[in-house]
C-alpha cells in the first residue's frame, strides 16, 4: 500500500521535474500575493518588525492560496489527460492513490512554504532570527493538515466544471477552525515569542490525522463511477 | 400522487396554524425573561456574609400588567427576599426606594436567588435584557436554528444511506434537506444578528465562538449547494455531495456546543446549567420548534417534488435525444 503511494508521488515529482508546470505557477503566485501585500500596504509604510502580528496572516494567506492552485491541478491533471483510468488500474488500493497525491502535494507546498518565507524576508525586510526552525515546524504541520484535507476535497471536486472555485468554496469552510486559525495563531506565537504553542499544534496534527482517516473511509467512494 | 398532494395540503395548514400560534403566544403569552423588577423597601447594609439579603417590592412597570411580563413572578406589591450571589456588594449597590432589576429564579419558598442585580436609571426601562421586547425573537431564532440542525441531520442520514445503499431517493432527500436547512440557518443567523444589535449594540462579533462557528456551518452548506449546482450533471456528483454532507455535518455539534465550551456572549438558555426558562417560555419555545418543523416538512416535501420533476424531465430529454 505505502509502496504504491510512494510510486505515485515519485511519478508526480518526475513529471514536475520535467515540465515544472505546477511549481512555476505556484511560486509565481506566492510571489505575486506577497507583492500585492507589499503594494497594498504602500501608503502605510508598514514595518513588519514593528508589527510582527501581521507576519502570520500574510504568510498563511499566501501559502493557502498558492496551495489551492497546487491542489486544484493535482487531480485535474490526471483527469484532463485521461490518466485517471490508468491510476485506477494500478494494483494498489484507492487510499494509496490518495496518499501518493497527498505526499506530492505536501512536498510541493513545502517548497512554497520556504519560498514564501524567503519572499517575506526579501520584500518586507523581516528578520525571523532564531525562530526560523520552530517556524518551519509549525509550517510543516500546518501544511500537512491543509494538504491532508485539501487532497480529499480536490479529489471530490475534480469532475466539476467549476472546480477551481468549487475547491475553494468547499475546502475553506472546513479548514477555518481546524487549520487556518490554529496555524495563524501558532505562527504568531512563534513570531511574537510569547504564548503556548502546544494546543494549536495539537489541533493541526489531530485534524491532519483525522483527515487521513476520513480519506481512508471515503476516498474509495470518490473515485468510483 | 393524490396522497402526496393531500400530505402537502395538511402540512401547509399545520405550518400556517403553528407559526401563527407561535407568533401570538410569543407576544401575548410568553414572559419577558429574565427580567424581574423589584423596588427595594429595606436592605441590611451591615450584612457581611457572602449573600446580601434585600427586601423588595415587586414593581409594576408603568402600568404594564406584571403577569404578562413574567408569570412565574409573584403578584405586584408583595415583599420578597432576594439572595444575591453575584459580584460586588448589593448593600452598597441598592438603597431604600431604589428600583432594582433582578436576573434570577424565583422560588416561592426561598425568594429570588439572583446572579445579577442592577439599579435602574430609568424605572420604566427593564434591565435584564437591554431590550426585552427584542428578546421575543428568541422564539423564532432558536426554533430556526434547531430546525436547521435537524435538516442538516437529515442530510447526514440520507448521505450515509446513499453511500451505503445508493438510490436516487436518498440523493434527492439530502439535496432538498440541505437547501431548506440552509434557509433556516440563514433565518437563525439574521435573527440573531438583529437581536445582537438591539441587545449588545452591534450586529456581529467575529471573536464570538458561537457566531463564528454558526457562520462556518452556513458556509459549509453553501458549499454543499454549490457542489450540487455548479457541476455538470455527472454520475459522481451525488456521491461527492454525499461525502461532503457527511464531512460538513461535523460543524453542527461544534456550532451547538461552541458557546458552552468557548468564550461566547451567546446566551445558553436551553440544555445548560446557567439556563433558566420558565414553563411558559418553554411551552412557547416548543410551539415554535413544532411550527418550524412543520414549515421544514412543507418546504422539504415541495423541494423533493421539484427535484423529482427535474430528474423526470432530464430522463425524458435523454430518451428523446437517443431516439433522434
Image (cartoon, coloured by chain):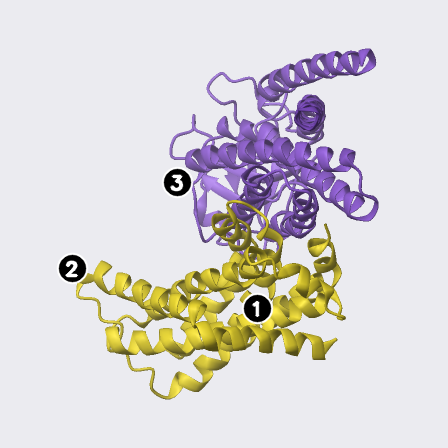
Chain colours: A yellow, B purple
Q: Chain of mark 3?
A: B
Which numbered tag is attached to residue A43?
2
Q: Quadrant of residue A145?
A: bottom right
Q: Are marks 1 and 3 on the same chain?
A: no
Q: Nearer the viewer, residue A102 or A46?
A: A102
Up-down: is A186 above or below A157? Answer: below
Which numbered tag is attached to residue A145?
1
Q: Residue at x 34, y 82 (%)?
A: A128
Which numbered tag is attached to residue B202?
3
Q: How many numbered dots are placed on residues in this image?
A: 3
Answer few, some or many: residues within 10 Å of disc 3's Cα (few below 14, many 20 plus, some between 14 and 19): few
SS at badge 2: helix
Answer few, some or many: residues within 10 Å of disc 1's Cα (few below 14, many 20 plus, some between 14 and 19): many
- Horizontal side, residue B119 vs residue B59: left or right: left
Q: Nearer the viewer, residue A74 or A111?
A: A74
Up-down: is A118 above or below B194? Answer: below
Q: Residue at x 45, y 63 (%)?
A: A64
Q: Are marks 2 and 3 in contact (CB under 8 Å)?
A: no
Q: Residue at x 37, y 73 (%)?
A: A116
Q: Residue at x 52, y 73 (%)?
A: A15
- Horizontal side, residue A29 vs residue A12: left or right: left
Up-down: is B303 above or below B116? Answer: above
Give how far across and how far down residue A17 sits, in percent: 47, 78
Q: CA distance from mark 2 to mark 3?
A: 30 Å
Mark nearest the camera among 1 and 3 is 1
Q: Chain of mark 2?
A: A
Q: Nearer the viewer, residue B282 or A1?
A: A1
Amino acid at each position: 500500500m505505502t509502496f504504491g503511494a510512494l510510486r505515485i508521488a515519485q511519478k508526480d515529482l518526475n513529471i514536475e521535474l520535467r515540465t515544472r508546470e505546477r511549481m512555476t505557477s505556484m511560486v509565481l503566485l506566492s510571489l505575486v500575493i506577497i507583492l500585492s501585500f507589499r503594494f497594498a500596504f504602500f501608503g502605510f509604510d508598514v514595518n513588519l518588525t514593528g508589527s510582527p502580528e501581521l507576519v502570520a496572516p500574510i504568510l498563511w494567506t499566501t501559502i493557502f492560496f498558492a496551495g489551492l492552485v497546487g491542489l486544484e491541478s493535482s487531480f485535474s491533471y490526471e483527469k484532463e489527460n485521461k490518466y485517471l483510468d490508468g491510476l485506477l488500474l494500478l494494483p494498489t488500493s484507492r487510499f494509496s492513490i490518495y496518499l501518493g497525491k497527498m505526499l506530492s502535494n505536501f512536498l510541493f507546498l513545502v517548497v512554497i512554504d520556504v519560498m514564501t518565507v524567503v519572499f517575506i524576508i526579501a520584500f518586507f525586510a523581516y528578520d525571523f532570527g532564531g525562530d526560523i526552525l520552530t517556524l518551519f515546524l509549525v509550517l510543516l504541520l500546518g501544511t500537512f493538515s491543509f494538504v491532508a484535507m485539501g487532497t480529499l476535497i480536490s479529489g471530490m471536486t475534480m469532475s466539476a466544471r467549476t472546480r477551481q472555485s468549487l475547491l475553494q468554496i468547499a475546502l475553506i469552510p472546513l479548514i477555518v477552525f481546524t487549520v487556518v486559525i490554529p496555524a495563524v495563531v501558532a505562527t504568531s506565537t512563534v513570531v511574537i515569542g510569547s504564548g503556548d504553542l502546544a494546543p494549536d499544534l495539537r489541533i493541526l496534527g489531530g485534524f491532519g490525522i483525522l483527515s487521513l482517516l476520513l480519506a481512508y473511509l471515503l476516498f474509495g467512494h470518490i473515485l468510483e463511477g | 400522487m393524490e396522497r402526496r398532494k393531500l400530505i402537502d395540503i395538511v402540512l401547509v395548514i399545520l405550518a400556517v396554524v403553528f407559526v401563527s400560534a407561535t407568533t401570538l403566544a410569543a407576544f401575548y403569552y410568553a414572559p419577558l425573561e429574565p427580567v424581574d423588577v423589584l423596588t427595594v423597601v429595606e436592605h441590611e447594609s451591615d450584612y457581611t456574609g457572602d449573600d446580601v439579603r434585600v427586601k423588595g417590592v415587586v414593581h409594576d412597570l408603568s402600568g404594564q400588567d406584571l403577569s404578562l411580563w413574567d408569570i412565574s413572578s409573584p403578584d405586584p406589591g408583595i415583599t420578597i427576599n432576594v439572595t444575591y450571589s453575584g459580584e460586588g456588594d448589593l448593600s452598597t449597590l441598592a438603597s431604600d426606594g431604589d428600583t432594582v432589576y433582578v436576573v434570577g429564579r424565583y422560588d416561592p419558598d426561598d425568594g429570588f436567588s439572583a446572579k445579577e442585580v442592577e439599579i435602574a436609571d430609568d424605572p420604566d426601562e427593564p434591565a435584564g435584557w437591554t431590550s426585552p421586547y427584542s428578546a421575543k425573537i428568541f422564539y423564532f431564532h432558536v426554533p430556526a436554528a434547531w430546525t436547521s440542525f435537524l435538516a442538516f441531520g437529515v442530510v447526514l442520514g440520507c448521505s450515509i444511506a446513499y453511500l451505503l445503499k445508493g438510490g436516487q431517493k436518498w440523493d434527492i432527500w439530502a439535496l432538498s434537506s440541505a437547501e431548506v436547512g440552509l434557509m433556516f440557518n440563514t433565518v437563525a443567523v439574521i435573527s440573531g444578528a438583529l437581536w445582537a444589535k438591539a441587545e449588545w449594540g452591534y450586529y456581529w462579533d467575529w471573536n464570538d465562538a458561537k457566531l463564528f462557528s454558526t457562520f462556518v456551518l452556513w458556509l459549509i452548506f453553501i458549499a454543499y449547494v454549490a457542489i450540487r449546482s455548479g457541476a455538470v450533471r455527472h454520475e459522481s456528483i451525488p456521491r461527492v455531495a454525499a461525502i461532503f454532507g457527511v464531512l460538513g455535518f461535523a460543524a453542527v455539534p461544534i456550532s451547538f456546543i461552541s458557546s458552552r465550551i468557548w468564550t461566547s456572549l451567546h446566551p445558553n438558555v436551553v440544555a445548560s446549567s446557567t439556563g433558566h426558562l420558565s414553563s411558559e417560555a418553554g411551552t412557547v419555545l416548543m410551539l415554535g420548534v413544532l411550527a418550524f418543523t412543520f414549515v421544514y416538512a412543507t418546504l422539504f416535501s415541495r423541494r423533493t417534488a421539484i427535484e423529482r420533476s427535474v430528474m423526470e424531465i432530464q430522463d425524458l430529454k435523454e430518451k428523446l435525444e437517443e431516439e433522434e
